[in-house]
Image (cartoon, helix red, strand yellow):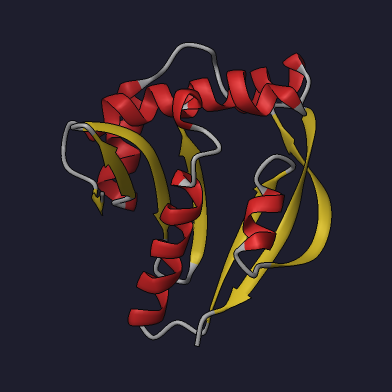
Amino acid sequence: MIRNYQFGDHIAIAEIFSRAIHETASEVYSEEQCGAWSAKASHPGHWEARCEQKNPFVFVAGNRVIGFCELDAEGHIDCTYVHPAHGRKGVASRLVSHAVDAARSRGLRKVCVEASICAQPMFARLGFVTIKKQTVEIRGVGLENFQMEKLCG
């Protein structure tokens, strides 16, 4: 089930973010890159503030938050992550499809994302087009990702 963020979800979201990077993204990004992207320890306080501002969509299974996706007012999808134990089961695809539907219902003409190497194939399957491959710098470390967009009008 997908629903809007509720206070308290940030605790699971903090863990999902850290684990997804250090257990899933680490398949294609180096240890140094993953460390620049996220600390191994989760930081619920940071995520509490961020979730209150961003109001992400959360995927709940068995009363547990197992994934989340942020969509800002301009149609930018940020932070789409799934707990590693639930990866490759369609959770991220369903969250992103939900975000696209929400953008459409808000009257937005397109959505965009900076997709990681691991997420790029999923976004492509959902109809996102790669605009360009780029390297972003986080804490002095370069990470490749893909600027992608999808028309939703």
**Measured from the top left, where is residue 39 in percent x and y?**
54, 16
Q: Quadrant of residue 105?
A: bottom left
Q: Quadrant of residue 68?
A: top left
**Measured from the top left, where is residue 30 in percent x and y?**
78, 20
**Measured from the top left, where is residue 101 in percent x and y?**
39, 72
Foreground: 147 or 101?
Answer: 101
Q: Is 7 situated above or below 83?
A: below
Name the residue located 52 percent from the left edge and 63 percent from the top edge: 76
Foreground: 91 or 114?
Answer: 91
Name the residue located 65 percent from the left edge and 45 percent from the top edge: 119
Name the residue located 50 percent from the left edge and 88 percent from the top edge: 153
Name the residue located 27 percent from the left edge and 36 percent from the top edge: 61
Q: Is 4 situated above or below 10?
A: below
17 sits to left or right of 29: left
Foreground: 94 or 102?
Answer: 94
**Measured from the top left, where is residue 150 in percent x and y?**
61, 74
Q: Is 86 situated above or below 19?
A: below
120 sits to left or right of 131: left
55 sits to left or right of 78: left
